[in-house]
């Protein structure tokens, strides 16, 4: 009995240390916020507040667009990766995970070389009117690239958790592949879709390295935090960061509550 | 009538060979054999989930060999019943009818009729994860039978049930057969299920159909020996324990 208690006590201490590790920087940030600078940054100073609000809106919009596009690509791609075996599957899966391994500045350079005006597919993109250098779509591309493996891996886990025999039963009941996918697979995948969306959205919001290379302008929150830190100092950078962290926390708590319901 | 001719399936190193097998209308065929001999592969090939390398599967002279599962009219019930966890019992039973775009009122009427037949009317609003093994099985049977399939493919349907429930469900399935008359292939490695339910017993060993027998023929074959020995062992032990008369409650 005593042994179990000791065991639980040890676990609790380690778990608490873990929470403390993640919580301390958040508390430190909240403590460091200067209310006057915060008000000035977001409301009273016309120049600063316009920059801050635009950057926040842009970041959220680009991260949302990136996650929606990843979801559209990820649902069929993960389906193929989990439901079918083919030669070279391991290589494809390794390629998908590359953004997890490389420095994000390198990712930015790779994106420029592929989709930039002078990149491999740049001319093709220009025909459709999409230019990624210093544009909204450049930010979205950078966000998509770094969030790609997170969305795919989350959806893959989701597909793997669905018992395939259920899909086979649906087919034997007369449902074709599409009906089976829409009526059986997709509803069961929904929690993973939400999780994948949430995680890739969070990853996209936090991206800075690749965005700095591909699209410095228009400025996202992260780029602006860096710029203000260098130009105006810590106080102003903290005012920006505080709102971003607060916003992310609210979004995560809300979404997790919705998913649980 | 379902006719299987020169069927040859290859899955990696595993092969399944069925030279000739005919399943008559309203026949209940039990496929027996030890674990891992290809009984489930056989069912999945019939259902259309596995494409054979060679051979023909016909229903009343219509070649179904290359038809996709949804066009065969063969309803499968897997070992774990395969209920759709996000749907209620009602929605599960109605699934095949909804896919066929049957009129809503007609669906409602049929679902209620089959639920009554399966004695699960009180469960229609429940989700599968709140049901017992026996209840799940009745839902799976209702869902399969309601579409009036050409054949029902049952993959070890009793293996997840405890003994008392198994006996109950055996009795229930026998009564249901008398009431509804349907064609079925029932895969099992349980001799009691086979003898209780089968019109005929097909025996598969090492990926090959060894023969098709009536139950009384089967018990005298070499294939039945291990199963019969097991039954005799139980019988002898019961005698030793002085239990001569056992009442079976179904």
Image: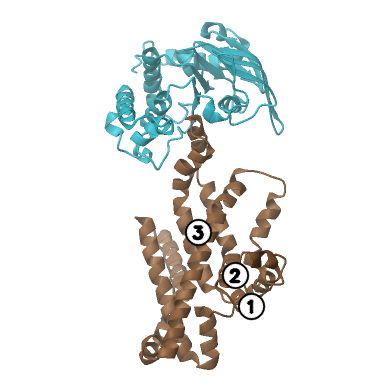
Name the residue at the left extreme: B122
Residue at mark 3: A196
Residue A144 falls in image quadrant? bottom right
Residue A142: which numbered mark, if any?
2
Describe the colour scheme in one phrase.
by chain
Tell us which disc is closer to us: 3 or 1: 1
| Residue at screen point 52% across, 78% down | A220
For residue A89, say whether it is visible: yes
Instruction: Tell me where residue B227 appears, x and y as whole percent.
Output: 55, 17
Circles 3 and 2 in contact, beta carbons < 8 Å:
no
State which chain disc 2 sits on. Answer: A
Residue A213: which numbered mark, if any?
1
In which quadrant is the N terminus of chain B drawn?
Answer: top right
* Dot 3 crowding, Cα within 10 Å, few <14, some 14–19, many 20+: many
In the depicted view, which residue is nearer to us: A143 or A260? A143
Q: CA distance from mark 2 to mark 1?
A: 9 Å
Lower sequence index among marks 3 and 2: 2
Circles 2 and 1 in contact, beta carbons < 8 Å:
yes
* Dot 1 crowding, Cα within 10 Å, few <14, some 14–19, many 20+: many
Colour in which chain A is drawn: brown
Lower sequence index among marks 2 and 1: 2
Q: CA distance from mark 3 to mark 1?
A: 26 Å
């Amino acid at each position: 009995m005593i042994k179990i208690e000791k065991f639980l006590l040890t676990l609790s201490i380690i778990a608490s240390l873990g929470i403390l590790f993640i919580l301390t920087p958040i508390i430190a940030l909240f403590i460091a916020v200067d209310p006057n600078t915060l008000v000035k940054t977001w409301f009273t100073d016309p120049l600063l507040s316009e920059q801050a609000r635009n950057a926040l809106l842009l970041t959220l919009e680009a991260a949302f667009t990136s996650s929606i596009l990843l979801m559209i690509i990820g649902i069929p791609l993960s389906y193929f990766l989990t439901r079918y075996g083919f030669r070279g599957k391991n290589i494809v899966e390794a390629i998908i995970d590359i953004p997890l391994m490389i420095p994000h500045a390198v990712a930015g350079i790779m994106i420029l070389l592929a989709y930039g005006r002078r990149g491999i597919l740049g001319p093709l993109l220009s025909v459709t009117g999409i230019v990624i250098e210093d544009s909204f779509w450049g930010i979205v591309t950078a966000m998509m690239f770094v969030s790609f493996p997170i969305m795919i891996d989350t959806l893959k886990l989701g597909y793997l958790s669905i018992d395939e025999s259920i899909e086979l039963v649906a087919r034997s009941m007369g449902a074709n592949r599409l009906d089976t996918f829409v009526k059986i697979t997709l509803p069961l995948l929904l929690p993973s879709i939400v999780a994948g969306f949430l995680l890739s959205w969070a990853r996209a919001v936090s991206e800075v390295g690749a965005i700095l290379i591909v699209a410095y302008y228009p400025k996202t929150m992260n780029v602006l935090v860096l710029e203000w830190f260098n130009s105006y100092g810590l106080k102003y950078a903290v005012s920006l960061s505080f709102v971003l962290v607060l916003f992310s926390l609210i979004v995560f708590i809300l979404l997790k509550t919705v998913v649980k319901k | 009538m379902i006719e299987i001719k020169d069927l040859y399936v290859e899955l990696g190193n595993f092969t399944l060979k069925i030279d000739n097998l005919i399943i008559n209308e309203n026949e209940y065929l039990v496929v027996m054999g030890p674990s891992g001999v290809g009984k489930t592969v056989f069912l999945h090939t019939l259902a259309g989930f596995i494409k054979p390398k060679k051979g023909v599967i016909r229903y009343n002279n219509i070649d179904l060999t290359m038809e996709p599962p949804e066009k065969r009219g063969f309803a499968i019930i897997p070992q774990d019943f395969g209920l759709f966890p996000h749907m209620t019992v009602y929605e599960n039973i109605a699934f095949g009818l909804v896919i066929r775009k049957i009129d809503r009122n007609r669906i409602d009427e049929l679902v209620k009729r089959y639920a009554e037949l399966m004695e699960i009317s009180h469960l229609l609003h429940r989700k599968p994860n709140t049901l017992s093994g026996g209840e799940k099985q009745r839902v799976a049977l209702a869902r399969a039978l309601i579409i009036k399939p050409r054949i029902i493919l049952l993959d070890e349907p009793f293996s997840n049930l405890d003994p008392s429930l198994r006996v109950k469900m055996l009795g229930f399935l026998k009564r249901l057969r008398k009431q509804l008359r349907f064609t079925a292939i029932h895969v099992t490695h349980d001799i009691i299920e086979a003898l209780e339910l089968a019109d005929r017993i097909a025996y598969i060993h090492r990926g090959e159909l060894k023969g098709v027998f009536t139950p009384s023929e089967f018990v005298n074959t070499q294939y039945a020996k291990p199963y019969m020995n097991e039954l005799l062992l139980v019988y002898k032990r019961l005698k030793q324990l002085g239990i001569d008369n056992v009442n079976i409650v179904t």
